[in-house]
Image (cartoon, grey):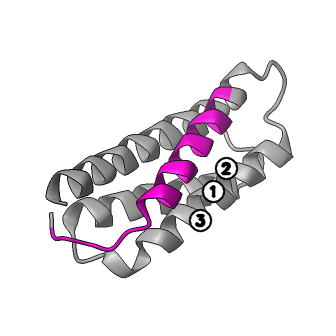
Amino acid sequence: MAQHHFHLDKLSRFSVHLDELCSDLRSCQEASPSELVDEIAATAGEIMLLLADHGEDELVRETLADARRLREAARTLQPPRAMLVEAGMALTQDVARIIREEKRAA
């Protein structure tokens, strides 16, 4: 992975926040609360913004694609909860890989 100048602390916070949101979503008994789904979409968007200038790296491109899919899914009318949770967890795993690679390269 090429050396990047990520804001690793921000990226990590957004990833943790997304993980918490997905956990909250999993525990919902009723339909997915729109505020929670909106927050998931917003957090995916924030991750996209942090990675936007680093799309030359394959892992970053994959992560951006995962973030875009999650954001688009969250913006649909009544998105399936399982799909959002799965996409959110995939994104948090991708972000964790980026953070590990960046720390290893530093």
Q: What residue type is labelled 1?
A: Thr
Q: Alpha carbon of mark 2 to alpha carbon of mark 1: how far?
A: 5 Å
- Residue 55 to residue 61: above or below: below
Q: Name the residue under label 2.
A: 40
- Residue 17 to residue 25: above or below: below
Sort mark 1 into few (<14), some (14-19) or many (20+) by Cα contacts within 10 Å: many
Residue 91: x and y in percent read 44, 47
Q: Quadrant of the N terminus?
A: bottom left
Determine whether label 3 and label 1 are within 8 Å by CB.
yes
Q: Which amino acid does label 3 sit on?
A: Gly
Q: Specify the farthest residue to the bottom.
A: 53
- Give left or right: position of 81 versus 6: right
Q: Alpha carbon of mark 3 to alpha carbon of mark 1: how far?
A: 5 Å
Q: Name the residue under label 3.
A: 45
Asked which quadrant contains residue 26, the reply is: top right
Q: Which amino acid does label 2 sit on?
A: Ile
Instruction: Verify whether residue 58 appears in magenta.
Output: no
Point out the stretch of residues depicted in magenta: 2-23
Asked which quadrant contains residue 23, the reply is: top right
- Give left or right: position of 29 versus 94: right
Helix, strand or loop at label 2? It is: helix
Residue 7: x and y in percent read 44, 66
Q: Which residue is drawn at 30% across and 54% down?
A: 98
Q: Which is nearer the eye, 18 or 30?
A: 18
